[in-house]
């Protein structure tokens, strides 16, 4: 990995960013990172958060944050607020989403009975696409072995599973954060993401960001990503010297300097 100061910012017009532990520190959206988003937006750089957080949160983010859109539930959908209209696009039709939720309920029951100390994430009630299992946000931190066991249960049922810094997220469907980013870029920016890679950067912090770290030439990890590097085949290309939202502020300062 290279230092952030080595990143060529010349062509960057769009910033994709994770939220938890990328814009936040200790679970809070700090003023430094929120202000950094405003500065980027006001300079003409579009911001698109890419998160594992639920549809209910994404509704608020798309409406109230200085962002162009938000991709939620690890690529299950994007929401964008344009001309006083909330536009929502999903990877899977509503009928299939309902069927998938029933299958996820069976996984939930098995995880909770098999992994003591695990819990359904507190934001599950406003999710539409996936199941989030909390392993350290509102519960005492589970061991790496327990987290791996949760992942294995999802996969045993044929679901995808990704580990963030706080949750194991699982879903049915062949999609991830990157696939929905490509759809949004084509729909609203009229660009081919493959051919215009140099116009984008991505900022993240954990293993569920790995498809983004691999794809983007300008992929950036905030410093706390170092805790996960041993589990990642595709680390970010660049690294900040500070963690979480303070690291994101460093990215904004570099792009705007």
Image (spheres, rainbow, N blue to C red):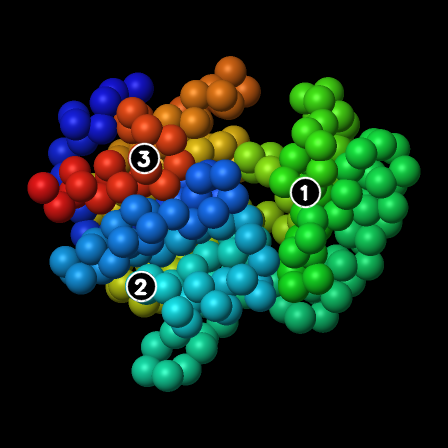
Q: Which of 169 and 194 is in front in this view?
A: 169
Q: How many labels does the image show?
A: 3
Q: Can residue 58 be seen in this view?
A: yes
Tell me residue 47's x, y (percent). 30, 56
Give the spatial CA distance, label 2 vs label 1: 28 Å
Give the spatial CA distance, label 1 vs label 3: 24 Å
The quarter of the picture where residue 221 lies is top left
Residue at the outermost right position: 113
Image height check: is 144 above or below 177?
above
Of the residues under marks 2 and 1, which one precedes in the sequence?
2
Image height check: is 73 above or below 113?
below
Of the residues under marks 1 and 3, which one precedes in the sequence?
1
Image height check: is 33 above or below 61?
above
Q: What residue appears at the point 38 percent right and 31 percent down from the top-left corner?
A: 243
Q: What residue appears at the point 14 percent right and 58 percent down from the top-left corner?
A: 43
- Please give the residue where the numbered disc 2 appears in the rendered image: 66
Residue at the outermost top position: 230
- Please give the residue where the numbered disc 3 appears in the rendered image: 247
The disc placed on residue 46 is: none
- Alpha-carbon neighbours of circle 1 within 10 Å: few (<14), some, or many (≥20)? few
- Please give the residue where the numbered disc 1 appears in the rendered image: 138
Does dot 1 land on a helix, a strand or a loop? loop
Of the residues under marks 2 and 3, which one precedes in the sequence?
2
Q: Which of 245 and 124 is in front in this view?
A: 245
Query: Relative to residue 26, is residue 46 drawn left or right?
Result: left
Tell me residue 19's x, y (percent). 44, 47
| Front tag of 2 and 1 | 1
Which quarter of the rendering shows the C terminus?
A: top left
């Amino acid at each position: 990995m290279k230092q952030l100061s080595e990143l060529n910012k010349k062509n960057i017009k769009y910033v994709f960013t994770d939220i938890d532990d990328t814009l936040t520190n200790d679970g809070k959206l700090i003023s430094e990172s929120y202000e950094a988003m405003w500065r980027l937006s006001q300079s003409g750089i579009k911001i698109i958060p890419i998160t594992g957080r639920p549809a209910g949160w994404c509704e608020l983010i798309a409406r109230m944050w200085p962002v162009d859109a938000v991709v939620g539930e690890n690529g299950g959908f994007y929401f964008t607020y344009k001309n006083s209209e909330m536009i929502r696009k999903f990877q899977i039709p509503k009928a299939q989403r309902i069927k998938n939720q029933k299958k996820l309920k069976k996984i939930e029951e098995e995880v909770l009975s098999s992994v003591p100390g695990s819990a359904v994430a507190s934001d599950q009630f406003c999710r539409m696409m996936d199941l989030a299992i909390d392993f350290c946000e509102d519960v005492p931190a589970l061991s790496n072995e327990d987290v791996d066991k949760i992942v294995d249960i999802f996969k045993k049922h044929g679901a995808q599973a990704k580990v963030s810094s706080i949750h194991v997220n699982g879903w049915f469907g062949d999609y991830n954060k990157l696939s929905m980013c490509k759809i949004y870029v084509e729909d609203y920016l009229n660009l081919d993401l493959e051919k215009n890679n140099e116009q984008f950067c991505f900022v993240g912090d954990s293993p569920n960001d790995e498809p983004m770290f691999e794809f983007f030439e300008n992929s950036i990890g905030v410093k706390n990503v170092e805790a996960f590097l041993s589990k990642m085949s595709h680390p970010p290309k660049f690294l900040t010297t500070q963690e979480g939202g303070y690291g994101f502020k460093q990215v904004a300062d570099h792009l705007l300097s």
